[in-house]
Image (cartoon, coloured by chain):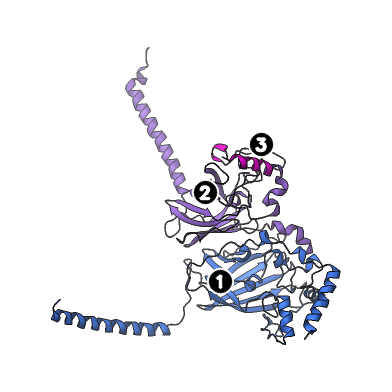
Amino acid sequence: MSIRLLRSVVAVSTIMAALLLTVTLVRGQEQAKAPWQQGQTADGQPDLQGFWSANPSGTYDITDPRPGGVRLDELLKVRAGQVRVPKPSRVVDPPDGKIPYQPWAAARQKDLQAHVDDPTKPEHIDTQARCFLNGATRGFFHSGFEIVQVPGYVIFLWEQNSEYRVIPLDGSAHLGPDIKLWQGDSRGHWDGNTLVIDITNLNAKARLDMVGNFYSDKAHVVERFTRVDDKTIKYEAVITDPTVYTRPWTIATMFGRGHIKDANYELWEDACHEGERSADKMIIPANVLKENQDREKAITQNK
Amino acid sequence: MHIHPLLSRRRMQKLIVLLAIAVAATFSMHAQDAGSNKIPRTADGKPDLSGFWQVLTSANWNIQDHKAEKGIPASRGIVEGNEIPYQPWALAKRKENYANRETADPQAKSYLQGVPRITYTPFPLQIIQTPKEVLVLYEYVHATRHLFTNGADHPPGHIDWWLGDSRAKWEGDTLVVDVTDFNDQTWFDHAGNFHSDELHVVERYTLTDADHIDYEATIEDPKVFTRPWKVDLTLYRHKEKGFQLLDYEGYGFDYEKYYP
């Protein structure tokens, strides 16, 4: 190639590169300024799809969100003088963050909580430990989940225990009261860009968390999902059960989006029940219970 | 032989042609009826398997021809040729399974039923078809299968899964699903037909019309069988208004009394 031609090529290339750089910079600025806009599914639903998890996560206690503690680990921390700073209760109404139980129900929950680590009866063992389904709300706190939307349905999927909830959007009526379901019966509709899910027909055998917070099969739960930006969904659930609580109360939390860069992230099999060997073995005979309690006292007091 | 003038050869020929046309017209009308029951398709032109389905066969109890037993209807089998080509050691094992079936059948523990038995476990299933997968939700112990159509291959194996790992693609109007990565814990039916962890299943789902899926599964297991073999059955669409999956939490029934 002649020098003249080479010079021309270099000149043109430089100009083109400069132009490209300018365009890219300008575009980049425009994108940085563009506000987030919620997409729509093919049938016009506001788009909630993706992989989500609660922040904070943890199914131990909805009034004290954290994962189920490993008992010895926690005891050792106490011995070392470490103080755990609790996160705010998921219960936002009543404002004190406590579940408004009727007196009999409060007593029952306290008893269940006292036996979380020292179960002596089958009912002391958390339903999740038996690989039972999570019922209302709990599924959103213990692990990540996926939201899939197709015409007429919103579907929640969990890898853990391959749990699912199918929410029809056709406006049909709930099942009759004689059918009780582990996940309850969900009916959904869109209120602007908020997905409202109405749950009845719960068999109430699932619990709200590990420490025995519970509802009855008269419970009526209304959930609301609102996507506030690309990576956040605001979640709220109002729980009404006049046989257990003194008034309706509200859970609220945020879900954060995961696996954003991995469009092909997959949910795989989780065979919970098939691997479950120990739930009933957790029941402690009375003499062993005494030994355990003495030992734990020794650990926490031995400085 | 004297033939009446009205039935002359020429006339007979014309009559036969007219009859043939009439018959052809009738058939094409029926074909049009079948056409009006044509298969639903997604926006990208693929057959849409979405909906609620269930089998009518009693293969769950015995995949081969069987007579009635208490609680079990008689049925022709779903096995092509009605023969399962066991290796000699495996045939003996199957007989042992059969003898112990009331306790040894993994269905007695409400375990995940494996493939293809989860298809013909007698409970409804819901298919939800999305661009990246055909999602199958089973009412039986909330089993779930993701038949990935995203082009991704099986993960590096071997993985011991109850329902295997499923990778699917369309061949014409048939969804072909390659299923590997099984454990050896499931049976094909209550009669003790079984497999090893080298099981490999290829499923074929074909909508024959809007309300029927022809389901075929080719079963291969070099540890247990002398050659591959096939099962074939029909999935029927649930037409009841407002149909939905309920639940069957088999391993929960004995514990329900403790909760709430």
Quadrant for the C terminus of chain B, please: bottom right
Local crowd at mark 1 within 10 Å, few (<14), some, or many (≥20)?
Answer: some
Residue B77 within the segment the image draws in magenta: yes
The boundaries of the magenta stretch are B71-96
Local crowd at mark 2 within 10 Å, few (<14), some, or many (≥20)?
Answer: many
Q: Say whether residue B106 is left or right of residue A284.
A: left
Q: Is residue B210 visible?
A: no
The tag on residue B27 is none
- The subunit letter for the residue under badge 3 reads B
Q: Position of residue A220 (x, y in %)?
A: 69, 70
Q: Say whether residue A165 is left or right of residue B49.
A: right
Q: What residue type is labelled 1?
A: Trp
To the question of a shared chain for discs 3 and 2, the answer is yes
Looking at the colours in the rendered structure, which chain would you say is drawn in blue? A
The tag on residue B67 is 3
Residue B260 within the segment the image draws in magenta: no
Residue denoted by label 2: B213
- The subunit letter for the residue under badge 2 reads B
- Label 3 secondary element: loop
Return the residue nearer the eye: A157 or A227: A157
